[in-house]
Amino acid sequence: MTVLKSLKNTFKEHKALYTAGLILIALYILKPLLPHLSFLLLFSAFCGACCIIYGFLLHFEKAENRAAAVTAKALKYTALSLIAAFILSFVVIEARIIGGSRENERPCGYVIVLGGGVNGKEPSLALVKRLERAVEYLSDNPDCRAILCGGKGRGEQITEALAMKNYLVNKNVDPDRLILEQNSRDTRENIMYAYEIIKERGGAESVAVVTSDFHLYRTKLIMKKRGFENVCALSAETPNVPFLHTSLYLREYFSVILEYLNI
């Protein structure tokens, strides 16, 4: 009873903070219903835990034990500094991500279409958007060939590359113009294997790449590291699904950080 009473009193000290934290954590139970927002829900739960921890730091900051009070205060200011650093870096990197989604279309010998998930045998909504942009580009550049990138992932009955080929052939794209890369598991491998394919075929002065708008900045970073020069960037719209943009751009922030660190 004493412990429960103590927790109740602690909760009353910063009721709004603890309530917000519990709500943010509870949102994670929606993950099975909203799998496309899984990262946003995970980040929400993390923020909720941070709210509760911060509330405890405020509580112990007033403790009679001097050592506990000093430690809590030091941790509180450390937390505030980390939050400030996160907000600043988030604004800077998101500005780069948004700015990096601009196109610089021109004729190229090859266009790399990055994988984006397959539902069974059908391309996901995001991948369909990329393929629609690829169809436009291939139509405008009849001498260009497409390298379709993506292996078979969890829950996928065929490789992403094969799903893309089926879609493009149904859109009247000549199958002889399509080159399948079916071994890659992520963006880095998409680019690595596509580079090897182009190199084996004699190289190219310039190469185009199709991916989602939020993903284009990081893709260009990876391509530059891999050795691609004169990249023609083609941006596909992100599907208009509630909160999907928020989730994807948030996840991309952390992905760009990892790319900067080569992790």
Image: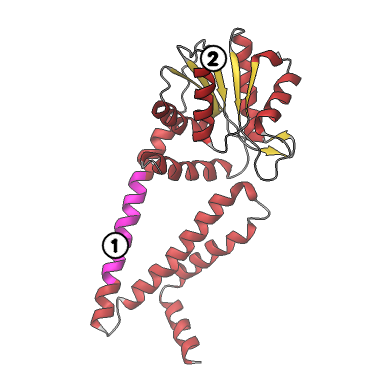
85 left or right of 199 in image: left
Image: 204 above or below 38 = above
Q: Residue 22 location in percent, x, y? A: 52, 67
Q: Which residues are magenta?
A: 73-89
Q: Amino acid at mark 1?
A: Thr
Residue designated by label 1:
78
Residue designated by label 2:
201
Image: 165 above or below 24 = above
Determine contact: label 1, label 2, CB under 8 Å.
no
Check residue 83 for magenta coloring. Answer: yes
Image: 22 above or below 203 = below
Residue at 65% in and 14% down: 177
User: Is the C terminus in the top left, top right, bottom left or bottom right quadrant?
Assistant: top left
Q: Nearer the viewer, residue 141 or 152?
A: 152
Image: 140 above or below 62 = above
| Residue 73 visible in this rendered orientation of the protein | yes
**Label 1, residues with CA under 10 Å away: few <14, some 14-19, many ≥20:** few
Q: Residue placed farthest to the bottom in the image?
A: 1
Q: Residue 16 location in percent, x, y? A: 46, 68
Q: CA distance from mark 1 to mark 2?
A: 54 Å
| Residue 137 visible in this rendered orientation of the protein | no
Residue 262's quadrant in the figure?
A: top left
Q: Nearer the viewer, residue 77 or 156?
A: 156
